[in-house]
Image: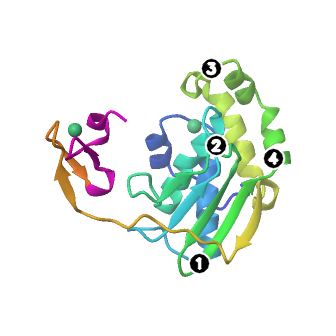
């Protein structure tokens, strides 16, 4: 097998089905950590800006990226530009950024597999027979990193994460807590966005 970074079983379990895109994202994430010379992120110091959009199956990559890097949705370390592109920039404040994109030829190579044909017919990955998904996943593992990815160092990349705050206020209408940056004023009292009506 060519790939050095194979998505572990727990990542597939977290993702929910067998598909080629989660392991591609996993590999992308591990390579990005390696190239930037950083460890998997434990806290809040590593960021991923994914260029994916929605409504295309390759977005599964983002689960692999999160599993590999520790830059998770819950820690607010991964965001999306909605460009609809198969790329992501990985950023560490001390190490700069690096952008990975999936090469068009690799995407075309995957398009020849039964798995993609079945997905195009609207069949969900969990309903696709195991040998069909294993075939394309195996192909991905057999490709070199250079075949799959374009890599572009971005030493000057800048990204300003939102500053964390514990300050919260009870909404004047529903009484639930709202973190202060999300408060709105209505009839002179602080309210949450749903209660504000806009
Ligand atoms: Zn998937
Ligand atoms: Zn409210």
Query: Considering only order in the chain, which callout, 3 or 2, is on the residue closer to the N terminus?
Result: 2
Count of numbered badges drawn on the protein: 4
Q: Quadrant of residue 167?
A: bottom left
Q: State the SS at label 4.
A: helix
Report if residue 5 is visible in the image. no
In this rendering, position of residue 60 left or right of residue 42: right
Expressed as whole percent of the image width and height from the top left, the position of residue 122 reads 64, 19
Query: Considering only order in the chain, which callout, 4 or 1, is on the residue closer to the N terminus?
Result: 1
Q: Quadrant of residue 136?
A: top right
Residue 106 numbered mark, or none = 4
- CB within 8 Å, label 2 to label 3: no
- CB within 8 Å, label 4 to label 2: no
User: What range is drawn magenta here?
Assistant: 180-198
Q: Which residue is mark 2?
A: 21
Quadrant into which the N terminus falls? bottom right
Residue 37 numbered mark, or none = 1
Could you give the CA–CA distance between mark 1 and mark 3, rounded to whole angstroms? Answer: 40 Å
Could you give the CA–CA distance between mark 1 and mark 4, rounded to whole angstroms? Answer: 26 Å
Q: Residue at x 75, y 68 (%)?
A: 152
Query: Considering only order in the chain, which callout, 1 or 2, is on the residue closer to the N terminus?
Result: 2
Task: Confirm if mark 2 falls within 8 A of ligand 1.
Answer: yes
Is the residue marked by circle 3 packed among few (<14), some (14-19), or many (20+) residues within 10 Å? few
In this rendering, position of residue 160 left or right of residue 182: right
Q: Residue at x 80, y 51 (%)?
A: 103
Q: Which residue is mark 3?
A: 123
């Amino acid at each position: 097998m060519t790939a050095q970074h194979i998505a572990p079983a727990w990542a597939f379990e977290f993702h929910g089905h067998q598909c080629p895109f989660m392991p591609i994202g996993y590999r992308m994430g591990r390579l990005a950590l390696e190239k930037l010379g950083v460890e998997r992120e434990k806290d809040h110091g590593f960021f991923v800006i994914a260029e994916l959009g929605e409504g295309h199956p390759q977005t599964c990559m983002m689960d692999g990226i999160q599993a590999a890097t520790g830059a998770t949705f819950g820690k607010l370390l991964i965001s999306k530009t909605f460009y609809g592109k198969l790329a992501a920039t990985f950023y560490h404040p001390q190490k700069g950024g690096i952008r990975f994109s999936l090469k068009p030829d690799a995407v075309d190579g995957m398009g020849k597999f039964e798995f993609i044909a079945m997905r195009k017919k609207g069949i969900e990955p969990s309903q696709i027979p195991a040998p069909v998904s294993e075939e394309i996943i195996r192909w991905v593992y057999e490709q070199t990193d250079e075949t799959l990815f374009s890599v572009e160092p971005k030493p000057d990349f800048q990204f300003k994460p939102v500053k964390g705050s514990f300050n919260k206020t009870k909404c004047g209408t529903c009484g639930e807590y709202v973190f202060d940056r999300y408060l709105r004023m209505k009839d002179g009292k602080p309210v949450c966005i749903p209660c504000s009506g806009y």
